[in-house]
Image (spheres, rainbow, N blue to C red):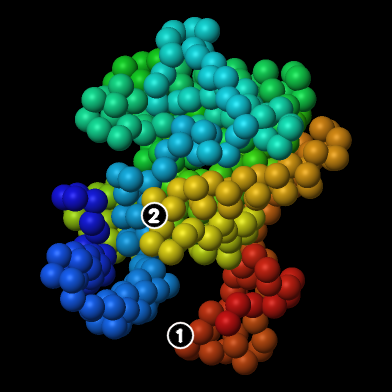
Amino acid sequence: MIGLTLDFERPLVELEKRIEELRNFSTEKEIDLSEEIATLEKKAEMLRREIFDNLTPWQRVQIARHPRRPTTLDYIGLIFDEFIELHGDRAFRDDGAMVGGIASLAGRPVTVVGTQKGRDTKENLARNFGMPHPEGYRKALRLMKQAEKFRRPVVSFVDVVGAYPGVEAEERGQGAIIARNIAEMTRLATCVVVVITGEGGSGGALAIGVGDRLLMLENAYFSVISPEGCAAILWKDGSKAQEASEVLKLTAADMKRLGIADEILPEPLGAAHKDREAMARTIREALISSMDELSGIPPRRLVERRYARLRRIGEFVTREAAQHDLAEAASGGGEAVRAVGPGSSKGEANA
């Protein structure tokens, strides 16, 4: 279908189309082409693995935005045993770009919140293309505070390019509610597990993205800004989004290496939209494991651990270089002080 095939997938799609044509020809003409078909299928499998094992950051961004990629409501229907959706922020209106409610996960009651995109033009307009207004974030916060009151764990699904940047959203306090959500989630006295399923853009993601564990799907991304926005700011040219995606370090692997993501959830070969049931099973297992780990921790200790976890993000250590390094630095040949990233021992510098 037009718009559903990404550029880097075209050689694979053409090969799959050729296989399908041979199957149809074999059936219609009653000719045995099983050997030829098997050879092409083997070639297609090798090509599929080659493509998806070597994706660039920009290609992962494209997959995260795929129109067939499962949405929050898709995952809720597949992961949870039952779900009762709750509406409204009790201040202005209900926001279709943010969904939430009460559900059951392996017999455990939980509160679920998440951003919701549409499948077609009509639904996207109703969901504001998955970009929440302030009332959407107020609804999410209301449900999370309710979960805290009844000691229910919170599961937050994130798939948003960013909060809605319109004038009316700013008039209703978009920046203020994002800041409040972040502050409230840091001290929420119940366990919070965040799952970034697609896009994790800017404050729109952070407003429901603070928790005790952060899980990322293999082809999701998490960034302070979209690649297009970054390119428009740095180079005054939004078309350099591919270059921006390289320097933003936004992939799941980058987030795990930097100590921001706790776990990367592998996607089915060809990405989550190829087998949403398998992807949902993987997420469900990770959620149950996380809940089992966190449920026995007292609320006060949970908040302390969460605060410490957040404080570790971006931490680095500096040291003075050896004497010969100082001399080299003075002559312009090196650095006198080096940063040590997450996972490095104190006093050691990254190579």
User: Residue furthest toward the top?
Assistant: 91
Q: Which residue is mark 1?
A: 332
Whole-percent x, y for residue 114 in the image: 50, 32
Amino acid at circle 1: Gly
Answer with the quarter of the image where residue 123 lies.
Answer: top left
Query: What SS does tag 2 mark?
Result: helix
Query: What SS does tag 1 mark?
Result: loop
Q: Is residue 124 above or below residue 35?
A: above
Q: Residue at x 80, y 38 (%)?
A: 295
**N-term mark: 1 or 2:** 2
Whole-percent x, y for residue 50 in the image: 37, 77
Q: Which residue is mark 2?
A: 274
Q: Residue at x 43, y 10 (%)?
A: 93
Q: Is residue 307 visible?
A: no
- Asked whether the beta carbons under mark 1 and mark 2 sit within 8 Å of each other, the answer is no
Q: CA distance from mark 1 to mark 2?
A: 52 Å
Whole-percent x, y for residue 180 in the image: 57, 25
- The number of numbered discs placed on residues in the rendered structure image is 2
Q: Is residue 176 above or below residue 264?
A: above
- Mark 1 neighbour density, 10 Å: few (under 14) some (14–19) many (20 or more): few
Q: Is residue 347 above or below residue 204?
A: below
Q: Is residue 154 above or below residue 92?
A: below
Answer with the quarter of the image where residue 164 lies.
Answer: top left
- Front residue of this view, candidates 330 and 342: 342
Amino acid at circle 2: Lys
User: Residue furthest toward the front?
Assistant: 30
